[in-house]
Image: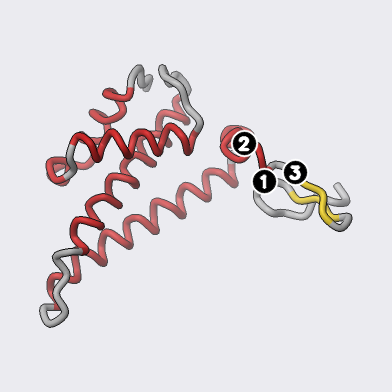
């Protein structure tokens, strides 16, 4: 799946978000897309299928965060049933973040440019990779 422009990324995300997509503004989607572009250090067009997949997934995550923030102001102390929507958004975001961390750990060469500034450093004789693992004696 090739993503040619930011608009394509937004459209793919809207399709996957279903009925919730109408609750996020165009400005919200553009901001989320900007965050994804910085997070993955991508430029358009995106031709790699794995990067395209994660661009859409991270876009969904940031859009879900926008929905969570919108729901936060609706929370009322004495009416617990309004809490459930907010709680479900938090659970979705946590799940998406765990999948993202797993993907970065499984494919460090693919996502290595995301954390290139932190890839290796030397401190008190120990060397760690981008994921914080000790590689001193490798």
- Could you tell me how far apart the alpha carbons at marks 2 and 3 are, in whole angstroms? 11 Å
* Residue 125: image location, x then y, percent: 88, 55
Q: Secondary structure at mark 1?
A: loop
**Mark 2 against mark 3, which lies toward the viewer?**
3
What residue would you read off at disc 2? 112
Q: Which residue is mark 3?
A: 120
| Residue 110, percent from left and from top | 58, 32
Residue 101, percent from left and from top:
52, 50
Q: Can you say whether 19 is above or below 77 in the image?
A: above
Dot 2: within a 10 Å radius of its alpha carbon, few (fewer than 14), some, or many (20 or more) residues? some
Q: Quadrant of the N terminus?
A: top left
Q: Are marks 1 and 2 in contact (CB under 8 Å)?
A: yes
The residue most toward the bottom is 78
Secondary structure under the numbered disc 3 in the rendered image? loop
45 or 107: nearer the viewer: 45
Instruction: Determine the image quadrant of residue 15.
Output: top left
| Circles 1 and 3 in contact, beta carbons < 8 Å | yes
Residue at 19 percent of width and 34 percent of height: 26
Q: Earlier in the sequence, mark 1 or mark 3?
A: 3
Question: Mark 1 to mark 2: distance in Å?
Answer: 8 Å
Please tell me which residue is depicted at 86% across the width and 58% down the height of the picture: 124
Comes first in the chain, label 2 or label 3? 2
- Quickly name the residue at label 1: 130
């Amino acid at each position: 799946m090739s993503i040619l422009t930011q608009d394509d990324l937004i459209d793919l995300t809207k399709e996957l978000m279903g009925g919730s997509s109408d609750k996020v503004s165009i400005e919200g989607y553009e901001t989320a897309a900007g965050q994804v572009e910085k997070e993955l250090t991508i430029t358009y067009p995106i031709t790699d299928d794995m990067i395209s997949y994660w661009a859409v997934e991270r876009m969904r995550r940031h859009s879900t965060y926008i929905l969570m923030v919108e729901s936060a102001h609706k929370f009322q102390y004495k009416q617990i049933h309004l809490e459930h929507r907010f709680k479900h958004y938090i659970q979705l975001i946590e799940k998406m973040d765990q999948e993202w961390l797993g993907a970065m750990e499984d494919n460090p060469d693919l996502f290595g440019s995301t954390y290139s500034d932190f890839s290796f450093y030397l401190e008190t004789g120990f060397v760690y990779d981008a994921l914080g693992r000790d590689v001193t004696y490798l």
